[in-house]
Amino acid sequence: MQHTELNILINDNNLIKLATFCDSYLNLKNAKLPKEYYYQSLPLCLIDAVFSIGIKYQTVQKVVERYCQFFAYKKFRDNVDLPPTEEQESISNFLSKQGKYDFTQVIFQNRNRTSPKNGILKTDAVFEFAMVLKKYKIEYFQDINNIYGNNNLITDIKNIPGQKSGISLKYFLMLAGDDNMIKPDRQIIAFLKSVLKQKVGLNEAQVILEKCCTLLRTKYQHLTPRLLDYQIWLYQREL
């Protein structure tokens, strides 16, 4: 979508229409994030982010649970605060397991691929993603800010087969704590298209929900784009 078309799409009428719909049909007053947004370690965010594209989330939860059970790891932290690095599994430690265990068959027990055409096993995509993070010294939650503005890292992630859209990276950042990021997957895009009666692209979805959230925050002060995204996902799941 060109810049002029974006300006046409993101106008006061559309934003008011979207905010009104969200206020009427989403549970914004009592909105809160689930436990998955408070993982104990960064590798769990990575596994969730890569596996979650294109499959039911219950399947993703089972993959994460199997990993935690196999290595006897804590899945969720006790509160919203970031755990100390010594209580987290590092990306390097996660990578050290590659080749020592059969992740696809034994640990993850999942053979989903990143895409039907020319995709790779999601297991392989997780490890390739992890290698990029290690390359740029992203080991713990406390390192996440080093991703922003690092175009080389973003390019390396998008060069992984099945990661070109950048959706997994956006979701990874959300799981790692970014309140301003959204996951513009098919559920979110379908919701926006249905409400606005217009085609909405991945980048446009981010801007639209950010601006919509700003409008809604006059009534729901705790609302963030990440939280709004999750409420939309819950709504779409029930359709």
Image: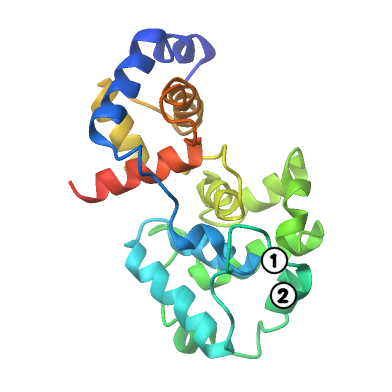
Reading the image, the residue beneath label 2 is 87
Specify the farthest residue to the left. Answer: 239
Disc 1 secondary structure class = loop
Q: Which color scheme is applied?
A: rainbow
Residue 61 at what x, y percent from top left? 41, 70
Is residue 172 toward the left or the right of residue 233 in the image? right
Q: Amino acid at mark 1?
A: Pro
What residue do we see at 73% from left, 81% from top? Answer: 96
Q: Is any part of residue 202 visible from this angle?
A: yes
Reading the image, the residue beneath label 1 is 83
Q: Is any part of residue 111 visible from this angle?
A: no
Residues packed near mark 1 inside 10 Å, few (<14), some (14 to 19) or many (20 plus): some
Residue 71 at what x, y percent from top left? 58, 88
The residue closer to the viewer here, 60 or 88, is: 88
Is residue 178 toward the left or the right of residue 224 in the image? right
What residue do we see at 55% from left, 40% from top? Answer: 181
Looking at the picture, does residue 144 appear above or below residue 189?
Answer: below
Q: Amino acid at mark 2?
A: Glu
Q: Are marks 2 and 1 in contact (CB under 8 Å)?
A: yes
What residue do we see at 42% from left, 56% from top? Answer: 53
Residue 24, located in which quarter of the rendered image? top left
In whole angstroms, how far apart are the C-alphas of marks 2 and 1? 6 Å
Residue 126, located in which quarter of the rendered image? bottom right
Residue 10 at what x, y percent from top left? 43, 15
Disc 2 secondary structure class = helix
